[in-house]
Amino acid sequence: MLKKILCLLLALVLLPGPAALAVKWEYPASAHPAVDYGDMLPVTAFDETALLSALKELEGLCSRHSRDRDGKEARRRVQALYAQVLEEMNLLVTKANLASIQYDASGGDPESSALYLELSAQQTRLYDRCYQVLSAVASSPYGGILDEDAGEGAAQSLLGYRGLTEEESALYQEEDRLIQEYDRIMAQGVPVQWEGRVWTAEDLEDAGTDGETAAALSEALTAGQYRAAGEVYLQLVRLRTDLARRADYSDYAEYAYEALYTRDYGLEDAAKLREAAKRHILPLQLRLLEESSDRDLRALSVQSRMSGEEVLDAIQPFAESFDREMADTFRFMRAHHLYDIEYGASKLPTGYTVALPAYGSAFIFNSPYGDYQDLSDTVHEFGHFFETFHCTQHDLWSDFNIDVGEIHSQALELMFAGQAGELFGEYYGTVYRDAVLYNILDSVLDGCLYDEFQAAAYRNPEMTVEDLDRLFKELSEEYGYSYGPGVEADPTWVENAHNFQNPLYFISYATSALSALDLWFLYLDHPRQGREVYLELSALSLSLPYRAAAEEAGLRDIFDPETVPALAETLEDYLDGKDVSYGGKKGLSAAQMAMVCIAVAYIVFCLVAVTRCMRFIQTHQAWPALSKSRRKDRLDPKRAPEHRSPGPDPWSVPDKKPPWEL
């Protein structure tokens, strides 16, 4: 929610922000103080006195000078004040993110909840104040200071900034309160009237009733919980619809795509992608499902039960071999305990990575499952940690395109899957790989499902909870879910916290998962080149929009109608045991490479001899220069069989959490 506030404020800027610079992978120098997580605690309130004082003086300096005056002393003072503002905001962001960690670790206890709400409201207000003052800087002789720090066009983007009104600030605070109400409902449940008395979840545990009675009561408690969460969602839908209309958008879905997430694709693009996923990705997921074995998955889960430190021990050799910078980052994270991935009875069921900019670092939080998913979840989050650890762009200037960030995490999951054989043996290494692949395809399909569901909800803000339950059931069937006879509605959509906390976010899992598959195929065919593309992508600022970032890294455009069918066909070939050929080019074996080297050496020898013999001949004719470039030949679309799996999903988890909550 805190990161979302920044995006919302940036959306109020009238002109587009500065474009992120496209660079080859080279991580900028960044200070990473050697501070342990424990030494960052306890989290305390943020004293805004110094920040407000700096903003007031900065505003005064800029308002006193006309555009044709730029005294050196005044300029140095403006630069110093601007640097102080950035430093103070780093501290505020860090405190707010530490408070969110404490909130989730404590299960949302009242004290943590109160501090989190206080810092969230403070952040909304102070970001707004910063942009108001920086707008004054932009229109003064010192606007160049902003361009020097944030990139060409930063000052221009802030001209005419419209700040938050009191009503908008109140709406954002109410949004935070409703999200916390949802958290409380899902963590603690709600009382229900059943057979003449009021029951709670605690009463059920202490009642000692027979199995049939306990099952009926449990069902009633779950139904009450779902209903209460659904009512909270309706309040959020109507509140967010109000916010969108205040910003002159027809509905919140359009607003979220453009203003909240600054995507370079729209709802129509997403609609076409959803249809492609149903046609080409769903059959492959169902194939994995049909070829899976409950017994194998249970055995893998037993083998993969690890403590948090054991999970990190299992991942570290991969990080060490992947890249020196990644190895150093992983060691730093462990040395300073910048993670909380152990089981905790009070933890909220969530997982995410957040920045700690005051320390030039980040933090991973995860509530583990106790099976193989803890490995993949931690690899996933380390992908985010790696990017965040090296990012030097200040939050004041970040548009934060999450579709790009999710490529970092999901591609790393796929690359790590190749190491599973060393952990579990060849057979169960394949089981682990297929489980990761299934979950990546699930990211595509569930990303599309929840996007379609939420877009419909925000287009029709007057829907009831019953309407939403029926809608979710109907859409779920289109994405391969099956229900027993007589089932007309499915309220389990409330279990997906993103619907409440980060609306219209889930499509980013779909887009990024497809790009992650594309990158993984390159990695399988050309490992060194795949690593370089991954590192280049990680080094790009998250302010570069998704499609632009994919193009810069050399990945295919998933919105091209040929791309998803091509990815599906490549994956089908891989599952059939065929070698992956990225772009129609197959790698050479060691023997073939040796023969090529001998042939090249012979040709070079002959050319040198001929050159020496003919040196006296003069000619005006030049040999044409030969150049090679990697070309991605798209495969022809291939229609996959359309069918649905009969049976349960062996990888479904009732309390499934989002891999990265922002």
Image (spheres, rainbow, N blue to C red):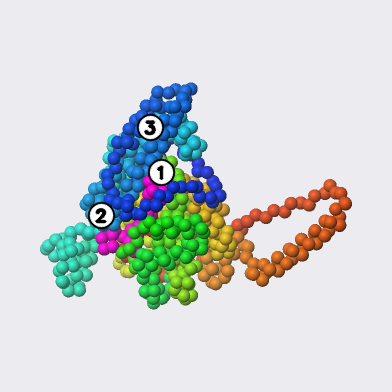
Q: CA distance from mark 2 to mark 1?
A: 26 Å
Residue 101 lies in the magenta stretch: no
- 89 is higher (above) or lower (below) than 504: above
Q: CA distance from mark 1 to mark 3?
A: 16 Å
Q: Which of the 4 image quadrants contains residue 649?
A: bottom left
Secondary element type, mark 2: loop
Q: Amino acid at mark 3?
A: Val
Identify the residue at horizontal 63%, vertical 56% (top origin). 630
How would you rate the neighbour count of disc 2 (Cα within 10 Å): few for under 14, some for 14-19, many for 20 or more? Answer: many
Confirm whether residue 639 shows in the render. Answer: no
Identify the residue at horizontal 37%, vertical 54% (top origin). 363
Residue 589 coordinates in the image, percent (x, y): 64, 69
The residue at which mark 2 appears reads as 108
Between 100 and 580, the one nearer to me in the picture = 100
The residue at which mark 3 appears reads as 133
- 48 is higher (above) or lower (below) than 470: above
The residue at which mark 1 appears reads as 395
Q: Earlier in the sequence, mark 1 or mark 3?
A: 3
373 to the left or right of 551 = left
Provide the residue span drawn in magenta.
344-368
Confirm whether residue 593 shows in the render. Answer: yes
Q: Earlier in the sequence, mark 2 or mark 1?
A: 2
Residue 348 lies in the magenta stretch: yes
Q: CA distance from mark 2 to mark 3?
A: 35 Å
